[in-house]
Image (spheres, rainbow, N blue to C red):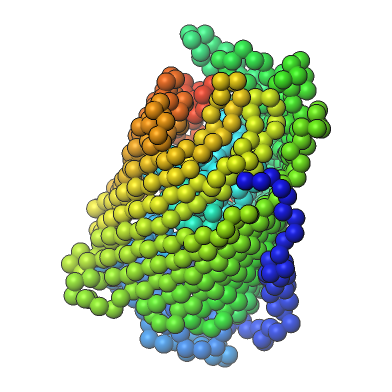
Amino acid sequence: MSDRIDQNISAPCRGLIVLLAWLAVCWADSLPAQSNLRLGGQVFDALSGAPLAGANVQVQHTIFGAVSGEDGSFEIENLPPGAYTVIFSMIGYEQSQTSPVIITEDTPKRISAALRPAVLTGDSVIVIADRYVNGAALEGEKIILTAENIARYRGLGIAQLLHQVAGVQVESGGGGSSRAIIRIHGSRASQVLVLLDGQRLNSPQTGEVDLGEIPLEQIDRIEIIPQGNSAIFGGSAFGGVVSFYTRQARDASRAALRWQGGSFSTARGSLAGELAWKRIGLLGSYSQDYSRQNFPYTYEGSTFERENAWYRNRKAFARLSLQTSRHEVNLRWSYRRGEQGLPSSFYNEMLHHNAFMESVSRSWQLRYRWLAGSAGFLEASLAYQDLNQWYNNRQDPSPFTRYHSELRNGLLEGKATAHYRPLAFLEARAGFQYLEESLEQRNLLYPALSAGKKQRPVLGGFGGLELELPVFKTVFKTLSLRSALRYERYFEHPGEWYPLLGATVVPAWLPALSLSAGWARAVRYPDFNSLFWKGDARARGNPDLQPERKSLRNFGARFRPSQANLPGLSFYYYSEKISDLIFWHRGVNGVWEPRNEGRAEKRGWDAQLEQTLIPKHLSLQASYSRLEARNKSEQANLRGKRIVFTPRHTANVSAWLGVRQWQALLVYRFVSEREVVAANTGVPLAAYRLWDASLSWRHSAGKFAAEWSFAVKNITAADYELLRGYPMPGREFQISVNLEYQMPKIR
């Protein structure tokens, strides 16, 4: 590949960006008369008459919906006049739907629904912790973590929550809010697409995403797709997709103050607010955190103290939303400034020389949705992110390892998607996307060694169909087929096609069982570090790298009975054949350089169990993942060897207990050993076992609420590493206090 800068973006690409911005900003000129119409009512258990909290209420073929509250009540605002079918669903109950409900401009309509306990049909979505949401099968097998899950793991952190999903790994260089990245089924973090409200966050420089870039205080839902899907998401969705969604401003306004402190001089504070007025919602938050991370660790029988692992971060977030009967606009902005020390490997004689890194990131997104009618909607978005980083090791006396560099990453993305459901059993989707990545690297010590500015565009479009066949109803309760096809052109490479095929079956004789299978092709383009790195004398990029490609097959089975005393079970099998997999190798001259391997294969399976022992009081969850990842290149010393940093066995078990205002959580995690050298000749990273626990208490008094929590991580003080030579903290304590004030509704 040439490293020539492609600065001349084609006229169609610029036209697409202008069109997206015009759709999102100028829609108001043609708004219809706004309406305060609403649909309300209550959802009950048909046998006991008790109100049902958490029932899903959806207006069929529209984007309008709600979830019932503690008293079973629900409200849907801004519903335009017309005749609608309303669907009620909830785990453990038969789905129910109304005859057409007529909405007029006069008075709000109220309806009630009584749901009967019954067996649920399965589909392509798992929702952990008693929440079930019907997702789009075109996007793949989904695991959805709800706001309730996020709240339960607030004391232990987002990493421990993600670990409960089979096949997901979160790796960090230390404790607290140290840099953390996500891997799925042994993939590199650069092979996992990370989205925030649909906006990609993967850095052009490394292809990775630091979880610190996510405004976790504002996250309401997390969706995990544990397989590659280039047909829908494009080139970065090679190993899987993790989507974070921020909260919508509710009817009431509130303010929250949170403080957290813990081991190793760790402290964190945040202030968040939420305002809702008619159709306008505003969210905002600001947070700061600091930690020395000077924890003790053991090496070869001696105890040392971690050095130069400190960090300091400041983050701000704001989101403005406006919704009318047919239009929805969201403007989101986030900012982060951070500094952190760069520790050296503990077994290396090289000193850290007080090396540090500074970073400033900003992102914004303008997203617009238009409800075209009862059968579909259009969505367009325009987003930009820049990430500027400075790496400084000027105190190193050696000119070969000393560095001081500046890197400026830019990411511009515009996309438009149309959803259309002309028939009850058919859904169609089509979309276009333009992505422009840029990196400017400057060597501030030796300007002549700077990589300069690199830029590459990606242009793609896709179409997809999901068809539920209304046949063989005596045999299949559900029989659905799905297919998608994407055409994408990357930089100077010719365009290629990326297909996806799948099917889902629910047998009529056992509707609690869901079976699904799929096949797809996926691609991932090399990151700029791999192509052009010139940071110091120890590593260099390879501009001749080819994109990584793979074909994948998967099979899933899910059993979700209605009886509360029976467990929910899921099984997922996958097989992948990968070509041109990128590995960094150390040459005979001691310089690290990436290159494409011939072939590699990955096979594995995940199993998940969810058991409610005492409804609303005690639940158990367990997951296990087995992975075989082997190098299949022709090189004799590499063929058949395990791919580095991929554990063969991973297991997680968690138990949650809730009694009145108290909640307790106990978490166990096991990870088997991992190879660190491509030829498997080095000493592997040892297996480790971790125990974490948290205890929280919450009290409400009128408009005020207070929550206190205490957490202990790594209870047994186990010694372990996620990266060779970078120890993780031993036993770590953490205490947090959260205060909330619910303000009167603004009218």
Judge whether residue 588 can be spotted in this image.
yes
Q: Position of residue 215 (x, y in %)?
A: 63, 49
Position above or below: 26 against 388 = below
Residue in the picture at 28% in, 70% down: 478
Q: Position of residue 174 (x, y in %)?
A: 57, 29
Position above or below: 581 against 119 = above
- For the C terminus, the image quarter is bottom right
Q: Position of residue 560 (x, y in %)?
A: 28, 58
> Within the image, what quadrant is residue 311 found in?
top right
Position above or below: 537 against 134 = above
Direction from residue 214 to residue 141 in the image, left or right = left
Position above or below: 545 against 487 = above
> Within the image, what quadrant is residue 449 found in?
top right
Residue in the picture at 62% in, 46% down: 1
700 or 745, nearer to the observer: 745
How many callouts does the rendering have? Answer: 0
56 or 201, nearer to the observer: 201
Judge whether residue 149 can be spotted in this image.
no
Q: Position of residue 296 (x, y in %)?
A: 56, 17
Residue in the picture at 72% in, 79% down: 28
Residue in the picture at 52% in, 67% down: 462
72 or 117, nearer to the observer: 117
36 or 741, nearer to the observer: 36
